[in-house]
Image: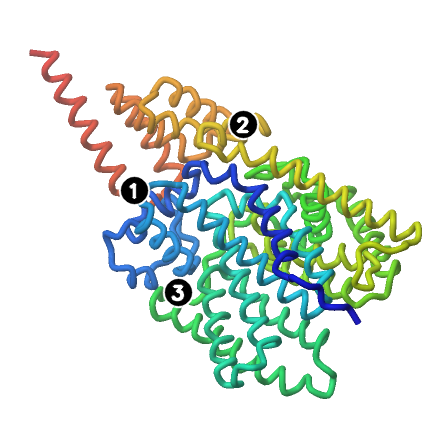
Amino acid sequence: MEQRPKYRFVYYGIPIILNIILYAHGLTGDFIWDDRSLILQNPYVQGSKNILEIFGQSLKIFGEDYGYYRPLSIISFAFDYLLWQKNAFGFHLTNLILHIFVIICLVYFCHQLFGFTQAILISTLFTTFAVHVENVVFISGRMDILTTLFMLLCLITYFFVEKIPLLLRLLLCYIFSLLALLSKEVAFVLVLIFVLVIIAKIPREQWKIHFLRGLIFIGGSVISYMIMRAVLLEKLVPESPVVTTPFLIRIINIPRLTLFYLQLLLLPFNLNARHYEFVMSNEQFISLFFSIVVLAIIIFIVVCVTKKWQIRFGILWFFIGLLPVINIFPLSGVPVAERFLYFPSIGLAILLTGLIASDGSMIKKINLKDFVIRIIIFLIAIINIVFTFIRIPAWRDEETFFKTMIAQNQKSPLAHHNLGYYYYRQGDWHRAEIEFKKAITLNPYFPAPHASLGDIYTRTGRYQEAINEYNNYLRLLPGAPNRMATISRIKELQNLLNNAQKDSQK
């Protein structure tokens, strides 16, 4: 049995201090990309609306409504705005603090399951994963941090806080699981994680009673969440984005996507806000076959290296965490995103540290196999730390961010459009026009740059060209959320042209 170390709070400080060192220079970043829509352009965040009205709103990003219901995340932005106004530092600080709370909860949770030494190792490795930059430094990435925090609090309260009376514990678990769902929909996996912890921790003869209790509080929170959606949003489930890849192909591609996620966690040399290199298609069966073989070999080796249940627990946590983001039923137009890995990465950290033979002491005589495993895990951590430091400056401001996106993929129409829109807001219409035209050249069917180019032409008095671009925008996006406003603008510009022609004829 592992001995309890003296001054445990000092050991807690290892992952916390490492986390602060890694992300301190990300506190000076600006609002980036979705932050503008979710925070700077959101009346519910800026206090011009009653904060309770947030519960009746779905999540809208630049006018697009996918039916996401995440009121708690928006409320967290509203509280930040109340304290900090438009000072991005405060929002970044909140993200960092929430990430630290997740680390503290992770240490406590893993301590109860795997022992204190393993808990510190797991949380420290979790802290180093470079994919977390998109959660911690990108303000809008907070949603995954919040839902992970509440899921961990729910598990800790139920399994490890036995001094609280049972009914109160169940009530608290119900509240935490509901808060997790109201932060982000991926919290539905809590049901499977709860079952996993029961199987790992509870004697078999007691499973039934714990399953029934879980059904009470998790089932109750899910029902409450669905009722809130149905009543307040009048929409029971989110709308699925337009998906061109057939369902069977998406299922077949799961091993390839899983392997890609593993690579992002273990060797994050290709961090990017948009992963265009991963495009599902019917013509990638060679890559798919390779992915299946490699993934099968990895799982076989990991399971056969040792029979430790911690490893199997970590594998199952990782795959359960991936279920909402492997495109079985796509919930967004983005097939791959680094922020999706925040919760699943806990499972990988548990798995990797489980490979380390430990009897409670990190300093002991070890065999060659254990030495090699420790070196590999140490190198994974160091590589992730290096790429974390490399990646964070890309999130400093929007110009740097979108230029980085373009440098990583010259053929990205979205990156060129967004950089152009940044220049447009700065009043640099010439550079904005150049970027909008590049975006259209790369993808003539991309609606947004046509509307943005129309705005440029309107500003610079080229009314007929503006009308043409607005018409192109409406043709490509008939259901545009600003359709009526765009039609009204076209009429105004046509009137200006008509008046100018009349004046020239006099």
- Badge 3 crowding class, 10 Å Cα cut-off, few under 14, some 14 to 19, many 20 or more, is some
**Which element carries disc 2, helix, strand or loop?**
helix
Q: Could you tell me how far apart the alpha carbons at marks 3 and 2 are, in whole angstroms?
A: 37 Å
Between 323 and 444, the residue placed more toward the observer is: 323
Viewer-side label of 3, 2: 2
Cα distance between the residues tagged 1 and 2: 29 Å
Q: Are marks 3 and 1 in contact (CB under 8 Å)?
A: no
Residue, disc 2: 406
Q: Earlier in the sequence, mark 1 or mark 2?
A: 2
Which comes sooner in the sequence, label 3 or label 2?
3
Q: Is residue 482 above or below residue 188?
A: above
Does residue 364 lie above or below 206 as drawn? above
Q: Which residue is mark 1?
A: 483
| Disc number for residue 264 | none
* Badge nearest the viewer, 3 or 1: 3
Q: Name the element at disc 3.
A: loop
Q: Is residue 162 visible?
A: yes
- Is label 1 in a helix, a strand or a loop? helix
